[in-house]
Image: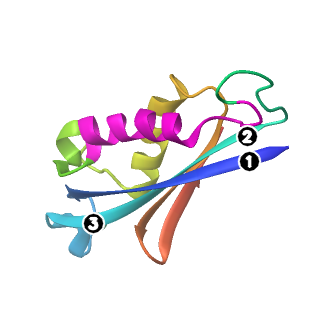
Amino acid sequence: MFEIEKRFTFHAAHQLKHHDGVCHRLHGHSYELIVRLKSEVLHTSGPQTNMVVDFALLKNEVQAMIDEYLDHRFLNETLETDSPTAEFIAEWIYKKLKISILRLSSISLFETASSSVTYSE
Ligand SMILES: [Zn+2]
């Protein structure tokens, strides 16, 4: 079984309106996103021969989603929730990417260097 992963970063603001600590204030994070794909087989012909997927194609797909919904956005608005926690954002990203990325297996979202969540089905 092959598992490939690619990392991305984006910067965004959010506000956890139900939180009883400082997170109820408007603030931002530099998020790190890891997208993972699993496959038992590799392409056997064409430009992706011996690859699960061309990293460049994966990058284009994920970056387009980041640019449209996440990077330099107010996540409460673009994700339509009053509590865009790391868990909520991770599930949202996974479900969005699942539509177009065939062998998606999991994603991890780092809110800080020491705090992350991994989502898979
Ligand atoms: Zn936060």
* Span colored in magenta: 49-70
Q: Position of residue 42 (x, y in %)?
A: 79, 32
User: For mark 1, what is the residue?
Assistant: 3
Q: Is mark 3 within 8 Å of ligand 1?
A: yes
Give the total number of marks visible in the rendering. Answer: 3
Give the secondary structure at mark 2: strand
Q: Tag 1: residue type?
A: Glu
User: For mark 3, what is the residue?
Assistant: 29
Q: Position of residue 37 (x, y in %)?
A: 66, 41
Q: Residue at x 77, y 36 (%)?
A: 50
> CB under 8 Å between callouts 2 and 1?
yes
User: For mark 2, what is the residue?
Assistant: 38
Q: Of callouts 3 and 2, which one flags the residue occurring earlier in the amino acid sequence?
A: 3
Q: Tag 2: residue type?
A: Lys
Q: Tag 3: residue type?
A: His
Q: Position of residue 90 (x, y in %)?
A: 46, 48
Give the secondary structure at mark 3: strand
In the rendered image, residue 67 lying in the magenta stretch gets the answer yes
